[in-house]
Image (tube, rainbow, N blue to C red):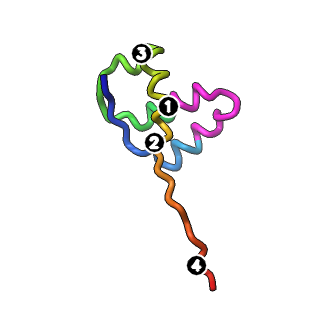
Amino acid sequence: MECFLKKPTRKTLAYASSFGTKDPIEFNEIFFSGGWLGGDEEIKTRDDLFLSTNTKLAEVIEVKEAEDATL
């Protein structure tokens, strides 16, 4: 089984983060549905498959390292 996700927008991340500490599963639901491009629909409906994707969600967000350019 596979699915394809796009990187979430700031708006999606902000909305999902509002649930983050209270309900991590809801965070993942919002993050996942906001980034869904396609794939096996069973991943959305079967708990075991959905939960297995949660470990990979962090890889979807690639945070770049910033440098302080002030002199």
- Tell me the amino acid under the disc marked 2: Glu
State which tag comes first along the sequence, 3 or 4.
3
In the picture, the disc for residue 55 is 1
In this image, 1 relative to 51: left or right?
left
State which tag comes first along the sequence, 1 or 3.
3
Q: Magenta span covers which residues?
A: 15-29
The Cα atoms of the two marked residues, 2 and 1, are separated by: 8 Å
> Where residue 52 sits in the image (x, y, percent)?
46, 23
Q: Which residue is mark 4?
A: 69
Q: Magenta includes 27? A: yes
- Tell me the amino acid under the disc marked 1: Thr
Residue beneath the point at 70% across and 29% down: 22
Residue beneath the point at 46% across and 15% down: 48
* 7 lies above or below 41: below
Q: Which residue is mark 3?
A: 45
- Tell me the amino acid under the disc marked 3: Thr
Discs 3/4, front: 4
* 24 lies above or below 70: above
* 1 lies above or below 63: above
Residue 41 is drawn in which quadrant? top left
The Cα atoms of the two marked residues, 4 and 1, are separated by: 34 Å
Which SS does the magenta portion mostly show? helix
